[in-house]
Amino acid sequence: MTASTIAPAERKLFGTDGIRALAGEYPLDPTTIFAVGLALGHTLRKTAAEPKVILGRDTRESSPWMAATLAAGLRQAGARVESAGIVPTPAVAFLARTHGFQAGVVLSASHNPWQDNGIKLFGADGFKLADAVELAMEDEILHHASQVAAPDPASLPAIEDKPALQSDYIQFLIDCVPGLNLAGLRIVADCANGAAAAIAPELFRRLGADVIFLHIGPDGRNINLSCGALHAAHVAEEVSARGADLGLTFDGDADRCMLAGSRKNVLNGDAILLMAARDLKARGLLTGDLVVATTMSNMGLEAALKRSGICMLRAPVGDRYVLEQMLAHKAALGGEQSGHILLPHLATTGDGLLTALVVLDLIARTGKSIDELTADLKVFPQVIVNVKVRERKPLQSIPAVAAAIRAAEDELKDSGRVVVRYSGTEPLARVMIEAESEEAMRRHADTIADAIRRELGV
């Protein structure tokens, strides 16, 4: 079965995961960041006289001045601001939902390099703000940015962090897996010099695990630098070299997790979905015997789930779209190949540390390794080619690109899939081909990528 996904028209500011750009440049310049604070504050005051907002950030050099600037805008709009300091993105979602905040804001660019940053928004319910709310804020943000002078970030006081909020989040994670004891388990954990570095050591210490931590010394510029979720193979090597049972790899804001097995092998979100789905089904917790994945998940996952009597639905790429499908079908499990795993009975958003604990709990209860639990997952050959683009024209409207996609679909038919889409967070077109024939897979991926490069490449 083949499918091609064409991204919607580009928005003015918000992508699929908030605003993301080069820190210091539009739309993450001080003026626009201040305007975001003003617009968010005004939006929240429609339902609360003095709304409270919780801030969190990752370890990027730009995050402190961005936090101070955003907070200044919020306060000018009549909101109160508290800071959890350096915490994973899901910690802010948890705190917003449980500590009486009307909104949560995370400053992070996830897996991107240190020069980038981003603004992610959560509502009082712990869910990401709906597209409609973000889009409604865009005109006000742009208006304020053109009319209001932002303060010089250097003149703003640093925000005071509240370490107790970090402790509350750690306790929440422990409470999600009651009785979990990791004594006797040897783990390698890569914290990507990011937000996980502030939480993971204390979390795993309290659970009794023997953990070899990698990349837990952030300096503002080494976040995701040759480490983290985009470089999970490094942890796989360390697991083998150190005789560990498994490896965990987090991205910069720790909202996703990748695994490494005992054979220098990397297990992505598809493998985690398979393990979790079978476990939930066995315990009668997989509502509708249904899992929601995305267009990027491998056909091998779909086949393995089917053998276990589990149906897989596909949503567009982006955890918010996975969640929409999950809510519509009352699904208990969903996620992305990239390691975003959604467990709505535990949390409102993807959480890499929580995902790790769920997997470790499964290992502890079954006595099986992650390699044993995923032994029958036969992955179809898959390649993803990223093409930098100067603009995002609808791909179906470009004859050469549309023809290349059509040719790939016609040849592959039921033996592969074609997914072509724009990234929601970077100026990239992503070409994914999956096929039984590796030669056909690479040939069609290169042909489509070349067509995009000729028409839209930088």
Image (cartoon, grey):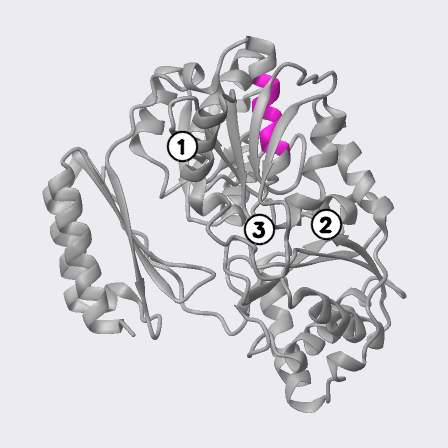
Q: Which residue is mark 2?
A: 92
Residue 266, label in figure = 1
Q: Is residue 357 magenta?
A: yes
Q: Earlier in the sequence, mark 1 or mark 3?
A: 3
Say what amino acid the circle numbered 1 marks. Answer: Val
Residue at 54 percent across and 46 percent down: it is: 251
Circle 1 SS class: strand
Residue 51, can we see it?
yes
Q: Dot 1: within a 10 Å radius of its alpha carbon, few (fewer than 14), some, or many (20 or more) residues?
A: many
Q: Is residue 284 magenta?
A: no
Residue at 48 percent across and 70 percent down: it is: 11
Vertical comparison of 37 with 172: above or below: below
Give the mark count.
Answer: 3
Q: Which residue is mark 3?
A: 252
Q: Dot 3: within a 10 Å radius of its alpha carbon, few (fewer than 14), some, or many (20 or more) residues?
A: many
Q: How far apart are the alpha carbons under marks 2 and 3?
A: 15 Å
Q: Earlier in the sequence, mark 2 or mark 3?
A: 2
Q: Earlier in the sequence, mark 1 or mark 2?
A: 2
Circle 2 SS class: helix
Q: How far apart are the alpha carbons under marks 1 and 3?
A: 18 Å
Q: Which residues are magenta?
A: 354-362
